[in-house]
Image (tube, rainbow, N blue to C red):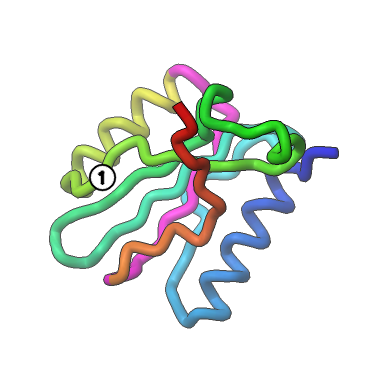
């Protein structure tokens, strides 16, 4: 059974809060199955963007668990914002969480590249 997007986002924001890292919901998407993107601002002029992992990177034991993959790494915050504008035009039901963390932690499970 796959967890709903609103549940995953709530847990993500809570986990960041436990680590005393600011995380905010920038865009609310479809509650059940909206795609989730995570922007991590490293507070040094760079930012990373994580999105849903491609199916090819998921292992069979990951079934039902949402995994994420880097979309942009070490980009400028403006580049990440531009990418998100494109993603929103493609999928207006997506979620966007923004995290400010000098360590660059996304607080989401990452898919391993098994290719």
Quarter of the image with the C terminus is: top left
Q: Residue at coordinates 27% horizontally, 71% vertically from top-left? A: 102
The residue positioned 26% from the left and 32% from the top of the image is 82
Considering depth in this image, is 100 or 104 the residue closer to the camera?
A: 104
Q: Is residue 81 magenta?
A: no
Residue 76 image point, x, y percent: 16, 47
Residue 31 seen: no
Highlighted magenta segment, given as a residue range: 90-102
Q: Position of residue 24 (x, y in %)?
A: 49, 61
Q: Would you identify the image quadrant in which residue 12 lies?
A: bottom right
Give the quadrant of the N terminus.
top right
> Position of 36 compared to 64: left or right?
left
In this view, the residue farthest toward the top is 90
Q: Residue at x 38, y 50 (%)?
A: 39
Residue 80: x, y in percent?
27, 40
> Which residue is most to the right?
1
Residue 50 drawn at (x, y percent): 42, 43
Camera-side residue: 18 or 94?
A: 18
Above or below residue 102? Residue 32 is above
Q: Disc 1 marks which residue?
A: 73
Which structural element holds mark 1?
A: strand
Residue in the image at 54% along x and 54% along y: 108
Q: Examine the rendered structure and indicate whether residue 30 appears above or below residue 102.
A: above
Whether residue 18 is situated above or below residue 111 in the rendered picture: below
Is disc 1 surrounded by few (<14), some (14 to 19) or many (20+) residues within 10 Å?
Answer: some
Q: Is residue 101 magenta?
A: yes
The answer to whether residue 12 of the structure is visible from this angle is yes
Total numbered labels: 1
């Amino acid at each position: 059974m796959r967890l709903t997007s609103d549940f995953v986002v709530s847990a993500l924001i809570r986990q960041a809060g436990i680590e005393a890292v600011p995380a905010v919901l920038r865009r609310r998407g479809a509650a059940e199955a909206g795609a989730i993107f995570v922007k991590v601002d490293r507070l040094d002029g760079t930012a990373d963007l994580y999105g849903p992992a491609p199916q090819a990177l998921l292992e069979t034991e990951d079934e039902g668990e949402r995994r994420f993959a880097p979309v942009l790494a070490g980009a400028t915050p403006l580049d990440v914002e531009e990418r998100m504008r494109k993603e929103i035009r493609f999928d207006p039901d997506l979620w966007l969480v923004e995290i400010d963390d000098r360590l660059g932690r996304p607080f989401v499970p990452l898919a391993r590249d098994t290719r």
